[in-house]
Image (cartoon, rainbow, N blue to C red):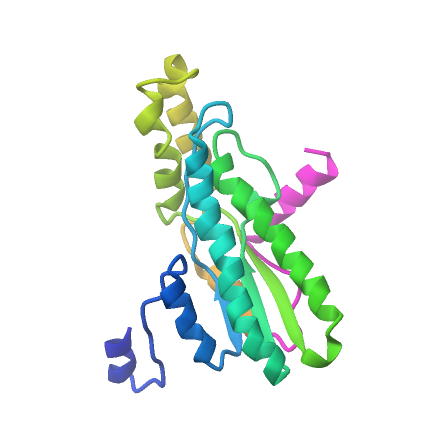
Amino acid sequence: MNSIAQKENLNIKSFKLDIRSEKDRDLVKNLDIDVLINNAGIGDSGSVSEVDVDRYRNTFETNVFSAIELTQAVLRNMIKRGSGRVIFVSSLIGRITVPFLSPYTATKFALEAVGMSLRDEMKALKDKNIEVALIEPGAYHTGFNQKNVMKQFVWMKKDSYFKDQVDKLEKKQLKYFEKIEMKSTKSIVEQYVKAVEDKKAKERYIAPCYQGAFIQFQRILGK
């Protein structure tokens, strides 16, 4: 990234940030950050009935707890300065349930709550001008969904309540994402840009639109 910035004569500096590392998180405390995008995330899969709870702990540690710790570190300077914007990258899957994906989707439900709670809390500090927003990407053809789905089958084939259905479940889940995934990421990239540049941040930035509308329709139906 630094070499690209130098080649293109861009005023950009990049450095490693492992959000699960306290040492790395401490690096941001001395930075004057205008916009924080909590984008880091990992996935996992399996049935609630049998998946190792440590898999939940692992996804929550990266997707939720570390994001909260990083946000708290950055907010100190934002509040002191009197301006700033915090963006949490959740997911449309953080508003509906998907079988066998709860080790991942549960973290996105949690980020929805964290983001909207912080948004309302910052309204009580009106003079600090801190805005909070969520970005909710739908399904895009990046390979992430397939890797996420396949993680469960490493251990399910050996010992699982569903071991007799493994092949069927694998095909069904992969086919589901094959049907709904968007090939181009342009629509969600545009939402990232809007979330950063909008004069007043909206609560949510959603793409692709048709997936967002479908999720909303399901919620209206109580699903």
Q: Residue at x 42, y 30 (%)?
A: 52
Magenta run includes residue 210: yes
Residue 163 placement (x, y as % from top left): 37, 16
Residue 81 placement (x, y as % from top left): 60, 84
Magenta run includes residue 8: no
Q: Residue furthest top?
A: 164
Q: What residue range appears in magenta?
A: 197-223
> Is residue 122 left or right of 5 when viewed as pictured?
right
Q: Residue at x 36, y 61 (%)?
A: 18
Q: Residue at x 69, y 69 (%)?
A: 122
Q: Residue at x 45, y 61 (%)?
A: 186
Can residue 207 be seen in the rendering of this structure?
Answer: yes
**Image quadrant where residue 146 sits:** top left
Residue 60 placement (x, y as % from top left): 48, 46
**Quadrant the C terminus occupies:** top right
122, above or below 3, in the image: above
163, above or below 47, in the image: above
